[in-house]
Amino acid sequence: MPARRTFATLDRDCIDAIAALFAVTPAVEPYTPDGTPVYRPALDGAADRGRVILPPPLRPVDVSSVGNHAWVLKDIGHIDLIDGVEVIFHPARGEGYLFVAVNGFVNMVMG
């Protein structure tokens, strides 16, 4: 069974773990909302050409994929990472999740 790690915040350790999940180095975007870096781990493998934008101080996650699909989850609470499988973003309030799998599958459920 793959290891599951939970991160309480979207900090640099979490961003590095997400990048490692997709075997990439997170690029730093050329803009910043408040002087804090905004990270963009480019997705590889089956998720090729997908994009994840992570601006830690604002706590959203923006995911886009090939085919003009996009998902945005604001006010991220905790983040679960299942090694070799997926990253799951949970909202700070309410129920639901946004997950991005290493095979390129993205799903968002709110409820």
Image (tube, helix red, strand yellow):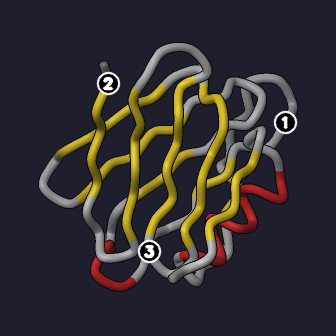
Q: Which mark is residue 36?
A: 1
Ranked by sequence position, the earlier of labels 3 and 1 is 1
Query: Cα distance, mark 3 to mark 1?
Result: 29 Å
Please provide percent x and percent y for residue 73: 45, 29
Write down the quadrant of residue 28 in the picture. bottom right
User: According to the image, label 3 marks what residue?
Assistant: 85
Ranked by sequence position, the earlier of labels 2 and 1 is 1
Q: Residues within 10 Å of mark 1 (few under 14, many from 20)?
A: few
Secondary-structure class at tag 1: loop
Residue type highlighted by circle 1: Thr
Secondary-structure class at tag 3: loop
Write down the quadrant of residue 44 in the picture. bottom left
Please provide percent x and percent y for residue 54: 62, 44
Write down the quadrant of residue 36 in the picture. top right
Residue in view at x 75 percent, y 56 percent: 14
Residue type highlighted by circle 2: Met
Query: Cα distance, mark 3 to mark 2?
Result: 21 Å
Residue in view at x 59 percent, y 62 percent: 81
Residue type highlighted by circle 3: Val
Locate the C terminus by quadrant: top left
User: According to the image, label 2 marks what residue?
Assistant: 110
